[in-house]
Amino acid sequence: MNALGHAPAAPETATAAVTQAPAASAPGGLTPARVESARVIDLRSDTVTRPTASMRAAMLTAEVGDDVLGDDPTVKRLQAVAAEMLGFEDALFAPSGTQTNLIALLSHCARGDEAIVGQQWHTYRWEAGGMAVLGSIQPQPLENRADGTIALEDIESAIKPDDPHFARTRLVCMENTTAGKVLPLHYLRAVRDLATRRGLATHLDGARLFNAAVEIARRRKAGQDADAGIATDPRVVAREICAQFDSASVCLSKGLGAPVGSLVLGSREFIARARRHRKMLGGGMRQAGILAAAGLHALEHHVERLALDHLHAQRLAQGLAQLGAAHGGLHVEMPQTNIVFVRVDESIAQPFTAHLAAHGVTPIGSSGRYGSGLVQRWVTHLDVSGDDVDTALAVATRFFEAGG
């Protein structure tokens, strides 16, 4: 039985990411100006997935009410199921991960308080400065190491003394996965111990929490987990991760494949504050059970299948790395989960990007977006099949066979 009270569901078959070609062009290969084939393999993000037929059916038959008034039964069920699954007292459904992160920050910190964050994490870099702009919360960004972690001594030294000259440090934020990398449980436990010792709360940006859990479960099955954990059910592993945090934000519309929505989870008292902040930020939705039904379906059917996305990312990275070794120009970072980063030499950056776009292969990338030079991000997801990976690699191969 899984955490929803059912026998584990068979993963749904992913459909090919075949879409109409984007009409507008943008710098750095964000969207192709012209596509020679009507078939587009969309590798920009795992946010581009479309609801499966069975997810649409669940949405169509969802029982609804007014969630702002607290009487949408499907939203209430989603919140209860997620809270139980991840080991929290309560949860709150909101439109986006950006909003659930901000709701959590506002619920932990008062004006003038400080949150410790990673330089490369969404709470600091990718969410429009919301904590500072809307919450008057001071971010204290720290450098991420190559494995995605922040050195414990850096966290410790960033905590301010109780002195009127300084913002009051209140919160330590983590992100798992971060740029596709998994933060290991022993590290998260050490962060939690540090925060507890210093009287700080902890928050997890778990937009891709289940990608992290699926990978940790795989390592345990293979005897590769440094934490020597026992559980190999990814939902149980996700609960172990969340046990290190006072609150978490979990996105339903990335790898899990729902069209909209994210959850913020915490204690009942915390979620009561969060509900007020959701209202303040305009995140209250009325008959939201239609969307919540998609989230419930995703939690039941789309967790285990994330392992397939990870395998597809490995195949994609291996193929691109072989091209780089044979021809030069591509420098591939092997993925841990579903995100592949490829640094493209300046000499081929523009023509390689244009070639991919013209043949309907659309990673995302631009100079300076993910580091110096052109770095492309190739993301596998529910709508990318094994055949799509083969096609994308064939398109990249033809570029080099034609002389680049």
Image (tube, rainbow, N blue to C red):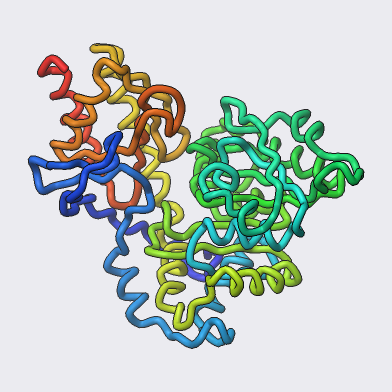
Q: Position of residue 277 (x, y in %)?
A: 64, 69
Is residue 260 in view from this perspective? yes
Task: Please tell me whether residue 258 is drawn above or below residue 353 in the rendered image.
Answer: below
Q: Position of residue 47 (x, y in %)?
A: 38, 53
Can residue 80 be seen by looking at this rendering?
no
Tally the numbered discs: 0
Where is residue 397, by image quadrant? top left
Residue 224: quarter of image: top right
131 w.r.t. 399: above or below: below
Work out which quarter of the rendered image holds the C terminus and state it. top left
Q: Where residue 92 appears, x then y in whole percent?
A: 59, 70
Seen from this angle, which residue lies furthest right? 163
As drawn, 69 above or below 290: below
Q: Residue furthest left?
A: 36
Q: Quadrant of residue 311?
A: top left
In this view, the residue in front, 39 or 185, is 39
Residue sitting nearer the eye, 187 or 357: 357
Q: Position of residue 250 (x, y in %)?
A: 55, 57
Q: Residue at x 25, y 12 (%)?
A: 326
**Left or right of 172: which side holds 94?**
left
At 49% across and 69% down in the image, what residue appears? 6
Residue name at image x 77 percent, y 52 percent: 113
- Which of 23/88 is in front? 23
Q: Residue at x 31, y 75 (%)?
A: 57
Seen in the image, is 231 located left or right of residue 262? Answer: right
Residue sitting nearer the eye, 118 or 163: 163
